[in-house]
């Protein structure tokens, strides 16, 4: 970080905002006054305070709302208005959670909440209950309806539809704090996608590095949408979760650059982790049958995509060799003979360039190299 740069600012989860809004609304229902600002206790013990953006009180009901600040994270819910409407519940009912406008409802098994429940995740529910207990006592009976303005539109930018969460966004958070560019939300969406696929009884899931490879692998295997996992750059994160939550068949699909990185042993294939090694790729070209001249042209390419264009034009099966070596990297993480692993390589237009066919992800593959591509 240079002297002109500042540290990235942290923000607050939708769960934290919902808890703070619920506390303010409950306090107003009991006392007639809305605390502003309103403080809540996070799972780690921190006690941030929030200004209310809107509040209303009626007969037996109160509503308070907070505008979410995600800090410097590119969060799709940054600036969203998160509101809580609190009503008294029947004696002994405890806290009952409802999905208001803009908050989704769970419709598929495999998520942390059963079908029919408001998509307010377990940690935010505990935070809301604790916040209400701070003003109403531990045995309080209330109905809490969480809503998010324009939440149904915001949800279109998330994976909620694929996970079977309809009608809006989810109220999320495990620490209450948004750490900029932590990628934790993406990794957790990978986990939930696998959970939903397993709960639906699917025996084949396909993780893709981007939308082009996802569309290509769906067509290649005629897969339902629920089987598609948007793993992005987090190949290792997906594979590690599958190791403890297995399915019978796993496909890893990606473009030439990211699959070359996987072949070189990288389990996080983001560009910031480093580029693919063209010297090592040239060595693989020789292994795939290239002569010295062709290998040198591949070594001198500006990028991996150009190297593959050269290989394709010369009829060199570079994609298959890269797929085999990527298979070795991925299989070492899964390490389960009961799980069959496949690698598919596509170009930026979704054209198929190579495959390591399904083989048990334990020991040496039957179709090629048993170790990843080593950097030179």
Image: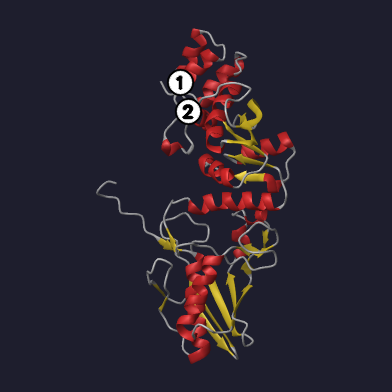
* Rendered view: 342 above or below 190: above
Secondary structure type for disc 2: loop
Badge 2 crowding class, 10 Å Cα cut-off, few under 14, some 14 to 19, many 20 or more, is: many
Residue 280, picture quadrant: top left
Q: Can residue 157 be seen in this view?
A: yes
Residue where numbered disc 1 is placed: 280
Outermost residue, right side: 222
Instruction: Answer whether labels 2 and 1 touch (C-beta < 8 Å).
Output: yes
Instruction: Name the residue at 59% across, 60% down.
Output: 154
Tally of marks: 2
Residue 358 on image: x %, y %: 67, 30
Where in the figure is residue 314, as x and y percent of width and height?
60, 13
Determine which quarter of the picture holds residue 62.
Answer: bottom right
Circle 1: element type: helix
Residue 202 position (above or below residue 117): above
Residue at the spot 42% in from the left edge and 81% down from the top edge: 36
Which residue is most to the left? 3
Frontmost residue, 307 versus 236: 236
N-term-proximal mark, 2 vs 1: 2
Q: Which of 123 and 49 is in front in this view?
A: 123
Marks 2 and 1 sit apart, C-alpha to C-alpha, by 8 Å
Nearest to the observer: residue 129 or residue 339: 339
Residue of label 2: 264
Q: In the rendered image, is residue 351 in sight? A: no
Where residue 351 appears, x then y in whole percent?
A: 65, 28
């Amino acid at each position: 970080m240079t002297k002109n740069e500042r540290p990235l600012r942290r923000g607050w989860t939708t769960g934290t905002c919902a808890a703070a809004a619920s506390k303010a609304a409950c306090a107003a229902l009991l006392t007639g006054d809305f605390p502003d600002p309103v403080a809540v206790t996070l799972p780690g013990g921190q006690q941030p305070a929030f200004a209310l953006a809107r509040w209303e009180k009626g007969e037996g009901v109160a509503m308070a709302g907070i505008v979410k600040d995600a800090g410097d994270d590119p969060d799709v819910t940054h600036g969203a208005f998160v509101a809580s409407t609190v009503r008294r519940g029947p004696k002994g009912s405890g806290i009952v959670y409802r999905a208001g406008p803009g908050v989704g409802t769970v419709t598929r098994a495999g998520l942390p909440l059963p079908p029919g429940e408001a998509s307010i995740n377990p940690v935010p529910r505990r935070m809301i209950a604790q916040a209400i207990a701070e003003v109403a006592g531990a045995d309080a009976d209330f109905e809490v309806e969480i809503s998010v303005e324009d939440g149904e539109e915001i949800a279109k930018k998330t994976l909620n539809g694929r996970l079977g969460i309809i009608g809006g966004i989810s109220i999320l958070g495990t620490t209450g704090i948004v750490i900029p560019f932590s990628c934790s939300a993406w990794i957790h969406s990978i986990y939930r996608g696998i959970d939903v696929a397993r709960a639906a009884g699917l025996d084949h899931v396909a993780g893709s590095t981007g939308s082009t490879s996802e569309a290509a692998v769906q067509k290649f295997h005629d897969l339902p949408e629920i089987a598609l996992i948007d793993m992005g750059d987090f190949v290792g994160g997906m594979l590690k979760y599958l190791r403890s939550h297995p399915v019978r068949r796993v496909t890893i699909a990606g473009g030439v650059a990211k699959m070359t990185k996987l072949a070189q042993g990288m389990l996080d294939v983001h560009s910031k982790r480093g580029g693919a090694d063209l010297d090592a790729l040239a060595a693989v070209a020789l292994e795939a049958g290239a002569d010295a001249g062709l290998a040198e042209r591949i070594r001198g390419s500006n990028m991996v995509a150009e190297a593959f264009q050269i290989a394709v034009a010369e009829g060199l099966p570079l994609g298959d060799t890269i797929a085999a070596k990527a298979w070795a990297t991925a299989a070492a993480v899964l390490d389960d003979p009961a799980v069959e692993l496949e690698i598919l390589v596509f170009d930026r237009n979704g054209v198929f360039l190579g495959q390591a066919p399904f083989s048990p992800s334990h020991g040496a593959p039957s179709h090629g190299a048993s170790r990843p591509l080593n950097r030179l």
